[in-house]
Amino acid sequence: MLLETKNLGITFGGLKALQGLNLTVDMGEIVGLIGPNGAGKTTVFNLLTAVYEPTDGEIFLDGKSTAKKKTYQLNRMGIARTFQNIRLFKDMSVMDNVKVAFSNETKYSAISGIMRLPSFWKEEKRIEEKAMELLSMFDLQSLVDVKARHLAYGKQRKLEIVRALASNPKVLLLDEPAAGMNPTETAELADAINLIREKFEIAILLIEHDMSFVMGICDRLVVLDYGKEIARGLPDEVRKNPDVIAAYLGGE
């Protein structure tokens, strides 16, 4: 199993924000984590990326415990994420936003970079070609020189996903990737995420409030309410679950 949590939980003061979560996501799988506001979904992402340290349970990436790892170490191990609130470098170009994420695999020396030796330019070309390939998957290739702040909201969302992919993750965590998108953009995003699954064979865990998006793209769903799992299964099974209907879906 690529990503696994065992009895994962965290307590803030006397409040149990998350308890007893047993979650698995395998290579090539898209799993949705859903639930009402305050259910603990983003808390799970913060635990998986070492923003928070769990008070209970364990997290395993590719069979290895992530205990005591820092966020940057987990990124190097293969976990990448996007955020509810977009966190791009707004005054940098689209291309430069993506190139930053390739820093873990840059192969030229500091001297080559300072002196602009041939090895530097060769590596720069390689990175730009890889960045352009990723940008093309999201139809952003014509915007490489545009500053991130000047992109439409939906394109900023896509750029954040591209930047996450540039770190070559094993597991991609998407926090409300379709938020603020119109129906056309949402459909394009779904196609792009399916392409990511096929091309990169990575595990994808996503949080999303757009139920039609979730039901259409996810292989499995896990539902949280008040920090506890209340249901899991195939999308159609979850849709019909009375506990889920009561807690979140409102009979949809």
Image: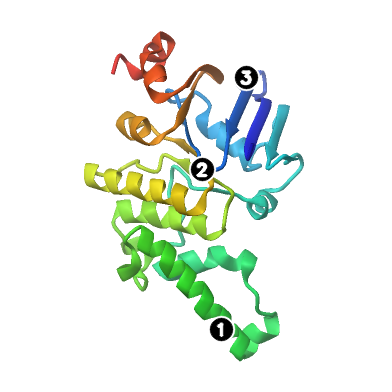
Q: Is residue 216 above or below residue 145?
A: above
Q: Is residue 112 above or below residue 6?
A: below
Can you tell which of label 3 and label 2 is closer to the viewer? 2
Helix, strand or loop at mark 3: strand
Q: Position of residue 240 (x, y in %)?
A: 36, 14
Residue 62 image-quadrant placement = top right
Residue at 47%, 43% (x, y): give it. 174
User: Residue 48 or 220: which is nearer the viewer?
Assistant: 220
Q: Position of residue 197 (x, y in %)?
A: 46, 47
> Which residue is tagged 2?
28
Residue at 66%, 55% (x, y): give it. 76
Q: Earlier in the sequence, mark 1 or mark 3?
A: 3
> Which residue is tagged 3?
15
> Which residue is tagged 1?
122
Residue at 67%, 49% (x, y): give it. 74
Can you tell which of label 1 and label 3 is closer to the viewer? 1
> Which part of the image, by quadrant, shows the C terminus?
top left
> Does the rendering let one see residue 233?
yes
Q: Earlier in the sequence, mark 1 or mark 2?
A: 2
Neighbourhood count class around disc 3 (C-alpha, 10 Å): few under 14, some 14–19, many 20 upward: few
Helix, strand or loop at mark 1: helix
Q: What type is the residue that disc 1 sits on?
A: Lys
Q: What type is the residue that disc 3 sits on?
A: Leu
Q: Position of residue 193 (x, y in %)?
A: 40, 47
Residue 184 - label: none
Asked if labels 3 and 1 touch by Cβ distance under 8 angstroms, the answer is no
Q: Earlier in the sequence, mark 3 or mark 2?
A: 3
